[in-house]
Amino acid sequence: MTVFLAVLASLAILLAVFWLLFGSPAAEPSLSFDTREIEKVLPVNCRHFPQISQLLSQEDIQFMRERAPHHIQSKWRGERRRILKQYLSGLRQDFGRLERLARLIAAFSPEIRKRQEWEWVWLALQFHFSYRMVALKLAMGSFSPEGLAGLTEMIAGLTSELENRMALIAEHSPSRMRTDVGG
Amino acid sequence: MGLSLFESVHWAATVLIEVVVLTFALRRKLFDQLPVFTIYLCILVANEAIVSLTYSFAGIRSHTSFYVYWAMQAVQVSIRAIVVYEICQALLSRYTGIWKLCRPLLITLGLVLAGSAAATSRQRVHPISATTLMAERGLEFTVVSILIFGLIFCRYYGVWIDRHLAWIALGLGFYSAVQVANNTFLRGEPMTHLPVLQIIRQTSFNIATIFWLVALWKPLPARQPAPVLLGPGEYDRLAPQMTLRLRELNSRLLEMWK
């Protein structure tokens, strides 16, 4: 049994090493903190919220309930759920981008706080767990669209704040950044 | 020397690959980037000469050969641990903040695992060979753990891994992982299964050296200039904002599914 476990553990270790080394490339070799790089990591899906908010409007729901035949209503609900699901997945991508931005900030900072970094790891774990739960709720049809609206506003707010902050840093880069010889 | 024809051919092939890898390493000026790994490659070639001479003079089954062989293995596994640390340093030290965070963790992990390997092997009541295998298994596990820990940091922070470093690391990780399983398999009756141990050990080592040859086959990429870092206070200004928003985001999401 011990031998079997050891072989299994070794295989797992090997796969982990291989994945960590040759899994999807993590970043460009010449990673820099310029505007283009920042744009790549800022959330984008939350910007589509106006279109989504139309889908979530109570008037539409009321209208469909009153006017549309039952089979059209259920088809509409199914389609709405599908779009919301896609949108929720987009929000997850946005969160991932924010996470990436947080790591980029850490990577390019001469000093980082251990506690802060662990907190980001913990928050990311929490987010992914909660996201799964919300997605499950959505799949089961017991989900309030208002919650999604609130979530979107928050990501959009954070994006806007970071966008301004990052643009400021990038603009002032020659005076505010320094070259550091690692060692 | 007491080796069969197959063993002699295998041994000759091993030496040849090691010499070729060392030649490539010197030609590619690997010493500038990975000095400890280059020294390790020199030690590998020297090890073959030392072990071969010992076998010739003392005989392959003698106590002297046994102790010389395992002493050399101990030296090699210790240097491999340092090489793994060196690779992590080559990857992460350009990012000062990350490296400052990672380095103490790597050192602590290495010391704890090596210490526990030493403690475990001392508790064994088996013969010396079994104790040696246990100690070696612990040290190989330390090597591969340090490697994985460093690579997790690279992956998490999106640090680019150069092709040659990836292949060198793969060789080290592969050999150590195989040895962990190999030494566990043989922990009970090591002497009975010694030929099997040796075949697996040497074959996995040959595969590792081929990975290193692949790493050094092409010219090494030019060293990237050190990245331009943010100002010292930017992290402290940005991090709390990010944390606050991410916390809010999480509590909102939590409310949604509860």
Image: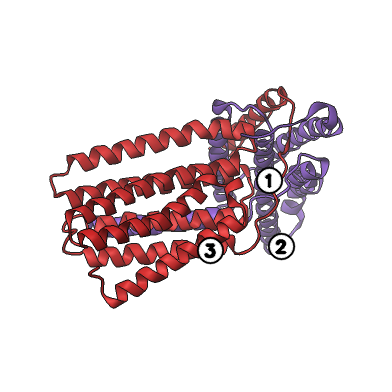
Chain colours: A purple, B red
What residue would you read off at disc 2? A72
Q: Nearer the viewer, residue B156 or B220?
A: B220
Question: Are dots 2 and 3 on a single chain?
Answer: no
Q: Residue A134: give x, y in percent of width and height.
A: 58, 45
Which label number is shown at residue A114?
A: none
Question: What residue is at 50 percent from the left and 45 percent from the top?
Answer: B36
Q: Nearer the viewer, mark 2 or mark 3?
A: 3
The disc placed on residue A91 is: 1
| Neighbour tally class for label 3: few under 14, some 14-19, many 20 plus, Cα within 10 Å | many
> Which amino acid lies under the numbered mark 3 shown in the image of this protein?
Leu
Q: Residue at x 57, y 48 (%)?
A: B31
Instruction: Kindly state the secondary structure of the residue where label 1 is placed.
Output: helix
Quadrant, the N terminus of chain A: bottom left
Q: Quadrant of the C terminus of chain A?
A: top right
Describe the element under mark 2 as helix, strand or loop.
helix
SS state under label 3: helix
Q: Is residue A65 among the parts visible in the rendering?
A: yes
Residue B196 position, x and y percent, is 25, 67
